[in-house]
Image (cartoon, rainbow, N blue to C red):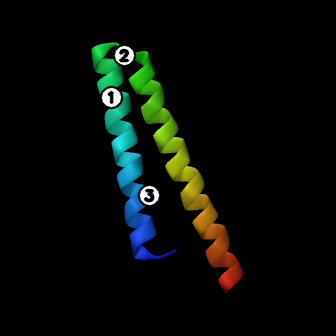
Amino acid sequence: MSGTDKANNKLEDLGGKAKETLGKATGDESTANEGKADQSKSSLKDAGEKVKDAFKK
């Protein structure tokens, strides 16, 4: 996995956590759920990159 991909996935994860926290703090369930979805998407991308790396070896 390239450093850029790792950084982008981490930023997406952090952004998702921020959205989730903001949503919970303001009582906005939609924003909180969006944040959770962003975090899940980031985790899936990270896992996909690890699988690619495993096949490159």
Please state which amino acid type lies under the numbered disc 1.
Thr
Label 2: which residue?
A: 28
Labelled pair 2, 1 in contact (Cβ < 8 Å) = no
Establish if 7 lies above or below 23.
below
- Find the distance from the CA under tag 2 to the CA under tag 1: 10 Å
Q: Is residue 3 left or right of residue 50?
A: left
**Element at badge 1?**
helix
**Element at badge 2?**
loop
Labelled pair 3, 2 in contact (Cβ < 8 Å) = no
Establish if 3 lies above or below 40.
below
Please state which amino acid type lies under the numbered disc 2.
Asp
- Find the distance from the CA under tag 3 to the CA under tag 1: 18 Å
Where is residue 32? Give x, y as percent. 41, 25
Please state which amino acid type lies under the numbered disc 3.
Asn
Label 1: which residue?
A: 21
Residue 35 bears which disc, if any?
none
Q: How crowded is mark 1: few (under 14 residues within 10 Å), some or many (20 or more)?
A: some
Which is more N-terminal, label 1 or label 2? 1
**Element at badge 3?**
helix
Which is more N-terminal, label 2 or label 3? 3
Query: Which residue is depicted at the point 48% across and 34% down?
Result: 36
Determine which quarter of the picture holds residue 40. Answer: top right
Label 3: which residue?
A: 9
Q: Which of marks 3 and 1 is in front?
A: 3
Q: How crowded is mark 3: few (under 14 residues within 10 Å), some or many (20 or more)?
A: many
Establish if 40 lies above or below 23.
below
Where is residue 10? Give x, y as percent. 39, 56
Q: Residue furthest bottom?
A: 57
Establish if 23 lies above or below 18.
above
Where is residue 8? Give x, y as percent. 39, 60
Which is more N-terminal, label 1 or label 3? 3
